Image (spheres, rainbow, N blue to C red):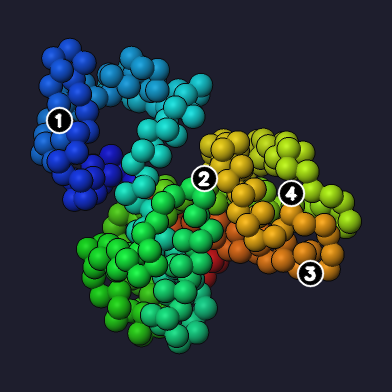
Amino acid sequence: MFFNDWLRKRDLYTPDRIAIVDDASGEQFSYAQLHERASSLLVLNRTLDQMVRTGVLVRYDEDDEPLYAIDVNATMAAAYYRNGAVHFLVNGAIAELALLQVARQASGQGMDAFHAEALRIRDTLKFEFFFEEKSEFLDQIARDLDVRAPGWREALAEGSEALFGLIVRINPLLAAGALRPFLESYLLLAETLAAQRPGEPVDGRTLLRNCMSLGRLRALQQRIGSEESVSKSYLENGLKLAESRGLLREDNEEIELAREAFLSELRSLVRRTGFIAAVAENRRIGVDPAAGIANL
């Protein structure tokens, strides 16, 4: 998601909240003011320069226009800034993944299937985010889709083709940027847990060490989106989720099946975030956003 898209979202939901404070003058800018002034190159440059001074960004001046990138040693710091904003995007991101699952299933259950899947993803992420009660949560994702995806109720009623068409038109798409690191981290834990030898006791610390080793390998293989997915705090919350589902008990046939189901669930969620990331990237480079649907 581009900076202006993110800023427009913050302006929509929290226009009066303080976004930045000028170090030199102490002047404060709300998200509404920052959005209004975003067209001013001066304001944008001040923001970027401040992040360079704090070591989060690196500036390259070799080309005609400066290029900014996250410092390789500041991945976790950048993740902190990102996580401060991601709470505002989580519900919409969950809605996208739920719509995509209903489109894949072609079950004909429409709204009921959408609600069930959204609540299931909400439960998966309950150790990362605070959610409203179920009824309010469902109302919130409905309001979000009313803004970003007009006609989503009709598409749910029509079926898979209409839903896929709707999903590739949603702008901005949130799921990959907002949820991918958490879900990839949980997938690392699910893979490690499923690889436990039958009858082997589960030790949390050993399991986390094995997860981090696997995560570093996956990062080198470029099979995960970023090293943020190997965050110990994410893995620890994934461990809490597995424990809450009774997956850390002594192995037996029932537990092995439950662990395989957990692994399948996370693989599905990560595949969906990858698909949404591909749609967003296709849109960015001017390729048909629908390209690749058959491979989901």
**Left or right: residue 111 compared with residue 146:** right
Amino acid at dot 3: Glu
Q: Nearer the viewer, residue 91 or 148?
A: 91
**Left or right: residue 168 compared with residue 123:** left
Residue farthest along the right direction in this orientation: 199
Q: Which mark is residue 254?
A: 3
Amino acid at dot 2: Pro
- The quarter of the displayed image where residue 63 is located: top left
Can you identify the residue that label 4 sits on? 192
Can you identify the residue that label 2 sits on? 181
Q: Is residue 74 above or below residue 95?
A: above
Mark 3–mark 4 contact, CB under 8 Å?
A: no
Which numbered disc, 1 or 3, marks the residue that appears first in the sequence? 1
Q: Is residue 93 above or below residue 62?
A: below
Q: Is residue 94 above or below residue 232?
A: below
Amino acid at dot 1: Phe
Q: Residue at x 74, y 54 (%)?
A: 248
Which numbered disc, 3 or 4, marks the residue that appears first in the sequence? 4
Q: Residue at x 55, y 66 (%)?
A: 295
Mark 1–mark 3 contact, CB under 8 Å?
A: no
Mark 4–mark 1 contact, CB under 8 Å?
A: no
Mark-to-mark CA distance, 1 and 2: 30 Å
Q: Secondary structure at mark 2?
A: helix
Amino acid at dot 4: Thr
Can you identify the residue that label 1 sits on? 29
Q: Which mark is residue 103?
A: none
Which numbered disc, 1 or 2, marks the residue that appears first in the sequence? 1
Mark-to-mark CA distance, 3 and 2: 29 Å
